[in-house]
């Protein structure tokens, strides 16, 4: 018996594995596209016109793939790839944000009315995560101050508390106990009113992908990334400093301020350097993530080791 039987088709007709896989996913894509045509659009409406902001960094941006596939959004799992895989179950329409508490004019905003509060701007910001990595992301958003001015905070509104949607059937991570749900964050009123603080509704010129906190999330570029709370449904003006989910989980590791500070280490690791996603060598972390000229004055006279 021959040890080698020639194939029944010519070698030139055999498709290499890689090309076979590529064709397969193309065909699956085509099948899905056919399906999508028959279904209502899943993608949010396009963003209104936006302007380029003078607050942007001119550093190279991370790619859309990096920005949308390496995420922290514990409502969808604790691995960096989990949000991209799982966030499709989040329903972002209809969506409202309730603004209440110490304000003269408490109000519920739908997304359309939020988008009309101020001209939208593209803001290219560095985001420094507490875990030691960073990215440069082209957000589209509006100053949080524009929303706060509408509701008129009273003199007792000294802090702002933000809350993410609570919906365990849409956010499977909320069925686990990794954090106390819903996710909560807070800012001092002057931090919230600062022109660098934005409510982001998009990135790379398109509505926010779900894994990045659709349809609306906070971005505070001089603080560690966890302050930038995603998928916000409530904003409350309060008299006392709110307790955030991370401070509640580990008060000695995550303080209220969480300003990026290379001189104050996390109890378990140094904060002096960071790895920009996509780069090999580490770079030095900058005070206030490089935004010291704009924000250092907010903390004049404060001991930043105690108020970490
Ligand atoms: N918001 C909610 N609701 N849940 C989260 O787990 N993770 C935070 C923050 N906002 C988080 C969240 C952390 S730790 C970071 S670093 C940033 O989102 C990441 O934002 P990005 O995935 O858009 O880069």
Image (cartoon, grey):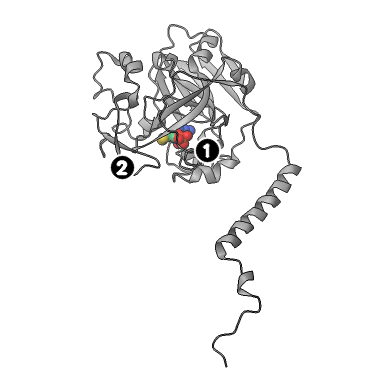
Residue at the spot of label 2: 281
Residue 96 screen position, x and y as percent: 60, 24
Report the residue at 32% width, 20% height from top: 292
Which of the 4 image quadrants contains residue 1? bottom right
- Whether residue 181 can be seen here: no
The Cα atoms of the two marked residues, 2 and 1, are separated by 27 Å
Which of the 4 image quadrants contains residue 72? top left
Q: Earlier in the sequence, mark 2 or mark 1?
A: 1
Residue at the spot of label 1: 211
Q: Is mark 1 within 8 Å of ligand 1?
A: yes
Secondary structure beneath dot 1 equals helix
Closer to us: mark 2 or mark 1?
2
Q: Which mark is residue 249?
A: none
Residue 25 screen position, x and y as percent: 62, 55
Q: Is residue 76 left or right of residue 225?
A: right
Relative to 240, residue 283 above or below:
below
Looking at the image, which is closer to me, 278 or 292?
Answer: 278
């Amino acid at each position: 018996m021959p040890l080698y039987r020639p194939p029944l088709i010519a070698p030139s007709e055999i498709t290499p594995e890689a090309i076979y896989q590529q064709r397969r996913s193309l065909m699956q894509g085509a099948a899905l596209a056919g399906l999508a045509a028959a279904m209502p659009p899943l993608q949010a409406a396009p963003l209104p016109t936006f302007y380029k902001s003078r607050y942007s960094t001119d550093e190279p941006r991370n790619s859309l793939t990096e920005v949308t596939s390496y995420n922290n959004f514990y409502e969808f799992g604790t691995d960096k790839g989990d949000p991209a895989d799982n966030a499709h179950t989040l329903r972002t329409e209809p969506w409202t944000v309730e603004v209440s508490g110490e304000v003269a004019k408490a109000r519920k905003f739908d997304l359309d009315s939020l988008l009309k509060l101020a001209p939208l701007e593209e803001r290219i910001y560095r985001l420094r995560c507490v875990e030691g990595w960073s990215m440069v992301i082209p957000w589209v958003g509006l100053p949080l101050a524009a929303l706060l001015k509408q509701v008129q905070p009273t003199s007792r509104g000294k802090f702002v508390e933000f809350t993410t949607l609570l919906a365990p059937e849409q956010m499977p991570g909320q069925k686990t106990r990794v954090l106390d749900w819903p996710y909560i964050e807070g800012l001092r009123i002057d931090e919230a009113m600062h022109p660098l603080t934005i409510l982001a509704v998009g990135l790379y010129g398109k509505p926010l992908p779900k894994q990045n906190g659709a349809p609306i999330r906070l971005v505070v570029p001089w603080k560690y990334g966890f302050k930038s709370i995603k998928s916000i449904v409530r904003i409350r003006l309060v008299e006392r400093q709110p307790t955030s989910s991370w401070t509640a989980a580990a008060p000695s590791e995550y303080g209220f301020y969480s300003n990026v500070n290379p001189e104050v280490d996390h109890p378990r690791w140094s904060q002096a350097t960071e790895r920009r996603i996509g780069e090999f060598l580490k770079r030095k972390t900058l005070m206030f993530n490089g935004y010291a000229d704009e924000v250092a004055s907010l903390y004049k006279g404060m001991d930043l080791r105690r108020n970490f």
